[in-house]
Image (spheres, rainbow, N blue to C red):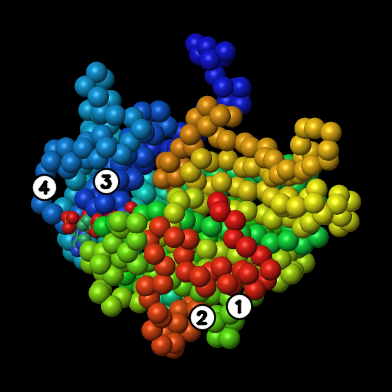
Amino acid sequence: MTDQSAIPPLRVGLTAPRVPPPNILVIFGATGDLTRRKLVPALFDLFCENRLPAQFCVVGFARREQSDDAFRADLRASVQQFARAKPDSASDRWEKFAQMICYHQAEFDSADGYARLAQRLNELDAARGTQGNRLFYLATAPEYYALIAERLGAANLAELGGAWERLIVEKPFGSDLTSACELNRQLRAVFDEAQIYRIDHYLGKETVQNIFAFRFANTILEPLWNRNYVDHAQITAAETVGVENRGGYYDGAGALRDMVQSHLLQLVALTAMEAPVSFDATAVHDEKVKVLRAICPLCDHDVDDVVARGQYAAGQGMIAYRDEPRVAKDSNTETYVVLKLVIENWRWAGVPFYLRTGKRLPKRATQIRIQFKPVPHPLFSRDVVSGIEPNVIALRIQPDEGIYWEFAAKRPGQAIQLSNVRMDFGYATSFGAAPGEAYETLLLDAMRGDSTLFNRNDAVEVAWSLVTPILERWAQLPPPEFPNYAAGAWGPVAADRMIARDGRVWQAP
Ligand SMILES: NC(=O)c1ccc[n+]([C@@H]2O[C@H](COP(=O)([O-])OP(=O)(O)OC[C@H]3O[C@@H](n4cnc5c(N)ncnc54)[C@H](OP(=O)(O)O)[C@@H]3O)[C@@H](O)[C@H]2O)c1
C-alpha cells in the first residue's frame, strides 16, 4: 500500500488515468528522428507506468531493410537516451516492451507494402487480442501524408467496421492556406474528420492544458480577464538553440510557419477563448476557432507596421544562421518573428496581443504574460511608486513550469515605499513532480478517442489564413537586411521599436 504521508499534498487523491482499449499503433517513418527521440521513449514511459493496454503492439513502417531484432535494438538505445525510465538489466521491462514491437519494411508508395501490412495486422490481432483497433501515426516528411492516407484507404485499412481506425498527422500541416486546405481535402477523402488527429505537441503540455484549469476553474479571474482590466498580453517563445540538425527543413519554413502558425496561435486561442460549455472536444474546438476568427486579418499595409522579422548573425561564440549545416549561404529565412494581433470581439477589443519567437535568444522560455492596467487613481506619490509596474499574471509554459502573480506591496519600515513582489506557483514544488511529456498525453488521448488536444481542420485553416498574407507580403518586398541580430541577443531592434510605438516594452520572460 502507498505511504500517503510520502505523497506531496497536492497529489493526494489524484486518480490513476484510464487505460485505453487494445490497439495496434502503426508508425510510418519508424526509423526517423521523431520516433526515436519522442514517440518510442514516450511509449516506454507509459508502459513502465502501466498506462498502456495489455493487448497492444507497435508496428514500425519504414524503408530500410532490417529485422525486428535490429529495429528493437536501435529503439533500446533511443529509450536509454531519451526516456525517463531506463531499460536496466535489473528488470525485464524492456524485454517485455520490446516483444510488443515489430518492424514492417516497405516503401510508402508500394501497394504491396500495404497489402502485407493489412495481413500482418490481422495476424497480430489474432495473436495479441488487439481487436482490430488501429492508430496510424504519420511521423514522416509532410509530402508523404496524403500518399500514405490514400494507400491506407486503397488497402481498406481506413475503415474496418466495428473496430476503430485513427490517423495522427504530424506538424507541419501545410505550408500556407492553399496547401493546408488541399491536405485536409486529401485526408478527408479517405478518413472522416472524427478519425483525424492533427498534432500540435504544445497542446499536450501540462502547462498548456493548465491554461484551461487556471482560467475556468477559478472564479476570481473571469471578471478581470478582459479589456476592462487587461492592458495587453505578451506571448514569448524563446529558444537558445539554433537550427540544430533541422537546417534542411527549417530553411524552407522559417519561424512564422514553424512557430507562429501553430504553437503561438494555439496559445493565443487558449488565452483569449470564451469558456466552452463543456470539455467535450467539439465544444473546445468551437470556442478556439471562434477566437481565431475574431483576430483582425492583416493586409499588406498592416504587415509592414505590425510584423517584423529577423535572422541571427554570429555572436557569443555561435555561428550565423547562414553558416549552419544545410542552410543556404544567402538565405532570407527568418529565425525571429514579432507581431501584434488585435482580437475584434467584445472581450478583447483594444487589447493588443504581442507575439515573439526566435532562435539563438538569450534564454529558453515560453511564457504568456498578461499585463493589467495601472490603478485608476494614483493614491501614492510619484516617488513612492516609481519603478512599480502594474499587476502581471505570467504563465510559464516551459521551463520552470508554473504561474506567478506580480503585485505591489509595502516594504517593511516606517516610510511608505512600495516594491513589486511575486506569488509563485511551481509544478515541481507544489506537485513534487515535473510535468510529463506532451507525446505521452497525446498518444493516450488518440488511443482513447479524445481529440480535445488536437487541431480540427477549421482551426488549422483559420491559422493559415492569418499567416499567409504575411508570407505573401514578404514575397513582394525586396530581400530583408539579414542578418539583423546577433546570436545571444533579444532579436532585432525592430521588435523593440514596434512595441515602443505603443508606449510599451518587452518584459524578459
Ligand atoms: N524530429 C522531431 O523532433 C520532430 C518534431 C516535431 C515534428 N516533427 C515532424 O515529424 C515528421 C518526421 O520527422 P523526422 O525528423 O522523424 O523525419 P526523418 O528523421 O527524416 O525520418 C523519416 C522517416 O521516413 C522514412 N521514409 C522516408 N522516405 C520513405 C519512403 N519512401 N518509404 C518508406 N519510408 C520512408 C525513413 O525511413 P528510412 O530511414 O528507412 O529511410 C524514416 O523512418 C516530420 O513531419 C517533422 O516535421 C519532427
First in residue order: circle 1 vs circle 3: 3
Q: Is residue 509 left or right of residue 86?
A: right
Residue at the spot 56% in from the left edge and 53% down from the top edge: 508
* Residue to which mark 2 is pinned: 469
Distance in Å between CA atoms under marks 2 and 4: 46 Å
Give residue 205's position: percent from left, percent from top. Answer: 49, 46
Mark 4 burial class by Cα count in 10 Å: few <14, some 14-19, many 20+ = few
First in residue order: circle 4 vs circle 1: 4
Tell me if residue 177 comes above or below residue 27 in the rendering.
Answer: below
Is mark 1 in CB contact (under 8 Å) with mark 2?
Answer: yes
Distance in Å between CA atoms under marks 3 and 2: 36 Å
Distance in Å between CA atoms under marks 1 and 3: 39 Å
* Residue to which mark 4 is pinned: 66
First in residue order: circle 3 vs circle 2: 3
Give residue 231's position: percent from left, percent from top. Answer: 73, 61
Q: How many discs appear?
A: 4
Give residue 270's position: percent from left, percent from top. Answer: 61, 55
Distance in Å between CA atoms under marks 4 and 1: 50 Å
Residue at the spot 53% in from the left edge and 69% down from the top edge: 495
Is mark 4 in CB contact (under 8 Å) with mark 1?
Answer: no
First in residue order: circle 3 vs circle 4: 3
SS under mark 4: loop
SS under mark 1: loop
